[in-house]
Image (cartoon, rainbow, N blue to C red):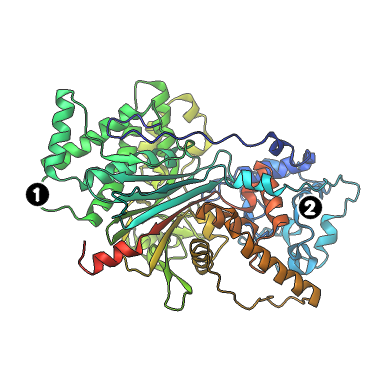
Amino acid sequence: MCVSPLCAPPPRRSRLSALSNELSALLPTLPRASALWMLAASCCDRRMCVCPGPRRIAIPVRSSRLPLLSDAMPAPTHLFPLIRNCEISRICSTMCYCHHKHLCCLSSHFAHGHFRYAPQKKFAALYRPKENFYQFIHARDYASTPQRFYLTPPQVNSILKANEYSFKVPEFDGKNVSSVLGFDSNQLPANAPIEDRRSAATCLQTRGMLLGVFDGHAGCACAQAVSERLFYYIAVSLLPHETLLEIENAVESGRALLPILQWHKHPNDYFSKEASKLYFNSLRTYWQELIDLNSGETTDVKEALINAFKRLDNDISLEAQVGDPNSFLNYLVLRVAFSGATACVAHVDGVDLHVANTGDSRAMLGVQEEDGSWSAVNLSYDHNAQNEREVERVKTEHPKSEEKSLVKQDRLLGLLMPFRAFGDVKFKWSIELQKRVIESGPDQLNDNEYTKFIPPNYHTPPYLTAEPEVIHHKLRPQDKFLVLATDGLWETMHRQDVARIVGEYLTGVHHQQPIAVGGYKVTLGQMHGLLTERRAKISSVFEDQNAATHLIRHAVGNNEFGAVDHERLSKMLSLPEELARMYRDDITIIVVQFNSHVIGAYQNGEL
């Protein structure tokens, strides 16, 4: 529950029932060797890899498409003496058992595998794809083979719906005058605890609604802080000078403050009560500066979003440098600063849609064409090595002598995947400042190997920024919905598929396409089965009452033919925490549905 004096009291909601205890017994105890595999994988964050030592072993990439052993990630050197005597065989067989019926487990598929990192010759046997690799991983026949466990449909639904949330914009006199009808959101964790966060709020002193997803790395502390604080910074940036003065006078005189946000939160989306006073003081300093710098001009939404992002990141850094007399708070602000988070935020006000993005989460607009089909329009760009403009931006901000070391293996300084993020002071502070803060910090920080690690070729910081890229879009009647999602969704689904699935869910109209078998040899009986599945899929589309839940079901359970496979979905949801993060990332989705009638009225000048 939010404890900020600027927060309107949230509507009362009953807490969702806890998940069944059956989840703890989904899979039997894994063989001892698999623990080594998990330990090797756990040292490597998906976004940030700082493992010492040059040796590398193969670890499954996290993806619901189930590629096995298709990537190589660093592992600590002291694990290698333990992985011997064909121990790797048992590890591999443990990892593959859930999916051995799928085509990806056949030897021919291993033969065409590829690896992101080139292995050293002495370890090539560990991850060189071979025609006989399937036989290799099953060489130890006497190793125990776990039994299969399948979740029932009610159990699957219980997991998928545990974190879903829906909000409908209230009507006045039987009319909804907002361009937003409402939104659905949901989360499916892969990390334990989940590192993603989400936020949604209505601006009370200005017009509009704010919605955002936040993807944490190196822990969830930064994502949690940003999800709590960023909307306040944006709302304050949008307030007129008179309202800022009124709020400051109320604080000075001890009067009740005007609430500026009405939060829409799932019961599991909490606020940090311990840090609320610290966060409020930093926010107050920000609005005091806005009062002093008042130019009398109308606030531009794009400028307000950029200023809010940059100022919050600056406050996160400053709070960590100054510290706090309270030992708990002191450790908290350091954890926030040394971890990191990306953010993708949308501000909707009438027909004006602004999307501010920092990192590799995405915003996508669902558009319904005249023939009823669906198309996707990107409203954000990934800030990573796949974005050539972003790579050039990084290079222009540093000397020519660092050009070759800035981006290695598609990571910033060879370590960080997103090129923009909150926190991550290890890529922003000077080496001297990092050492001073760590040495004067609590013992927990001093004993943490990650915080003491200095990135290689670290010469001209900062290498990272939280400044967002803002895109403005004028809504049209054919713009039906907006999807905000962390990269856990986009790693498994193409935006066009997302647009089609959500569009068909919201309208209930399905445009059937010829079944594509992708080159597979399909018998007449198998084709009949596919058609039967598609018919069953249409009849059961409304089992999900939440568009984000429906999208997660497809992201995790889709088979190679684009249909939800319950057996596959059950297997993916049955993976224990240590293995789930190897196959996919946390998934957080917000689906915003627009009011076409109101948008049309805006266009016609009626509103």
Q: Amino acid type of disc 1?
A: Ser
Disc 1: which residue = 295
Q: Locate residue 151, reporting x and y percent.
A: 72, 47
Disc 2: which residue = 97
Q: Locate residue 168, reporting x and y percent.
A: 40, 49
Q: Locate residue 320, reporting x and y percent.
A: 35, 33
* 529 in relation to 93, above or below: below
- Write the residue at 50% across / 40% down: 219
* 7 in relation to 167, above or below: above
- Write the residue at 43% across / 49% down: 213
| Front residue of this view, candidates 112 and 485 | 485
Q: Locate residue 603, reporting x and y percent.
A: 25, 68
- Write the residue at 24% across / 64% down: 602
Residue 39 appears in which quarter of the rendering? Answer: top right
Residue 539 appears in which quarter of the rendering? Answer: bottom right
* 510 in relation to 326, above or below: below
Q: Secondary structure at mark 2?
A: helix
Residue 322 appears in the figure: no
The circle drawn on residue 135 is none
Q: CA distance from mark 2 to mark 1?
A: 65 Å
Q: Amino acid type of disc 2?
A: Tyr
Q: Residue furthest right?
A: 142
Q: Quadrant of the C terminus?
A: bottom left
Residue 128 in the figure: left or right of residue 18: right
| Front residue of this view, candidates 305 and 530 | 530
